[in-house]
Image (cartoon, coloured by chain):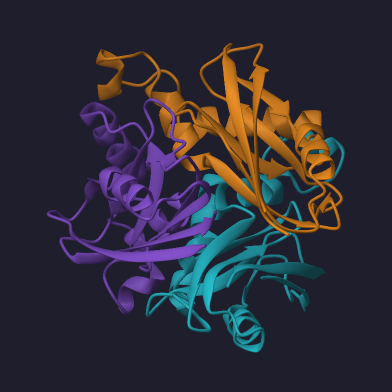
Chain colours: A orange, B cyan, C purple
Amino acid sequence: MVKRKVLTVSTRKRVDVLDITESARLFVEEIGAEAGLLNVFVPHTTAGVILNEAEAGLLEDLKELLERLVPELHPYAHNKIDNNAHAHLRTILLGSSVVIPVEAGRLSLGTWQRILLIESDGPRSRHVILTYVGL
Amino acid sequence: MVKRKVLTVSTRKRVDVLDITESARLFVEEIGAEAGLLNVFVPHTTAGVILNEAEAGLLEDLKELLERLVPELHPYAHNKIDNNAHAHLRTILLGSSVVIPVEAGRLSLGTWQRILLIESDGPRSRHVILTYVGL
Amino acid sequence: MVKRKVLTVSTRKRVDVLDITESARLFVEEIGAEAGLLNVFVPHTTAGVILNEAEAGLLEDLKELLERLVPELHPYAHNKIDNNAHAHLRTILLGSSVVIPVEAGRLSLGTWQRILLIESDGPRSRHVILTYVGL
């Protein structure tokens, strides 16, 4: 069985984090997924997706880390084209998709794991492609 | 065919690396996997999984790199909740799963590629979920 | 349906970026992939694969970022074995595979997303394993 759903979400700030776990959870429940893998894919180059805890302090720490490793203000070559090189580079470090096991209609996420879309060049409308492959 | 196995492993130090390649290799052999994909998933937020060489010097270099990019001692906001923000952030940079091709009952790993669980907040008992989807 | 193809590509410089999107696009078209997932896997420890824009300035920015975060000249322990610790560490940060949704024979990539092999220890011949799982 292969099932697919495209979510449309709106980020609210230049740098933002959206917890999309509930949408993914509902999707695997609705399609009656018995056992397989869910791919959560962000078809953009300045927003990515990760798995981790959605605690407010930690998300501030993540933003600070990304600014420290990949500062917004820097003489990037790409900024002659479009003023968002830092957003591309941060997305490269974070990644554009995650793959999560599914069993008996439920995501096999750990207690603290949440699916987090990381916006680095918002606010914008963003797509997320959910693809399930399995039984 | 979808097959799943949950491994339980024990990390031995605060920061540790466990080579879990052999367990994954045995799993795809035991289930008679002919052709497909293996997902190796760590359902935790302070331990991740990568693919690379398991040479002792390189693993020391990796620990030093992570300490340099994401130092343990830093005024993280998350540390008001739990004193392990660095472990979450390192895990975000490394990732929580890898996906490996399988052919004729064997992982298609390169000569030097090993599946490495990276513990950033141990020692602890950790789970690893192996999920095979294919023929 | 599971289909697999191994590409052989040649990198041209010590640090290089190869856009392999077209090969992946042709593969999913040729096999008549209707709906599923494509795994693009690099079976090496000093070259990885990412998704992002292939704009020349951005690729220079990426090389500069990797040199800033993981400098080539540094007293790495692994360099007693082989003088390429930085290449291993950069590959760990970037990752060794990407997973892309496929629908109606087409990769569901965003407008600017390209599949980029990132060479950190070239020039060399490199393999890329394409694995499709789906209908």
Residue farthest left in this picture: C12
x then y, percent, for residue A43: 50, 31
Residue C11 left/right relative to A124: left
Residue B44 placement: quadrant: bottom right
In terms of depth relative to the viewer, which is nearer, A116 or C8?
C8
Above or below, A93 against B61 in this view is above
Q: Residue at x 68, y 59 (%)?
A: B120
User: Does residue C129 sit above or below C24 in this rendering?
Assistant: below
Q: Position of residue B53 (x, y in %)?
A: 44, 74
- Considering only vertical position in the picture, is A86 above or below B86? above
Foreground pick, C92 / C110: C110
- Quadrant placement of the C terminus of chain C: bottom right
**Looking at the image, is B135 positioned above or below residue A126?**
below
Instruction: Pinpoint residue B4: horizontal percent, then vertical percent.
Output: 74, 71
Q: Position of residue B22 (x, y in %)?
A: 59, 85
- Total tally of numbered discs in the picture: 0
Image check: A103 left or right of C129? right
Q: Is residue B26 left or right of residue C123?
A: right
Q: Looking at the image, can residue A17 be seen?
A: yes
Q: Is residue B123 visible?
A: no
The residue that appears at 27% across and 35% down in the rendered structure is C59
Residue C60, quarter of picture: top left
Looking at this view, is A72 or C22 the one in front?
C22
Q: Residue at x 46, y 25 (%)?
A: A87
Pick whichever, C60 or B33, lies toward us: B33
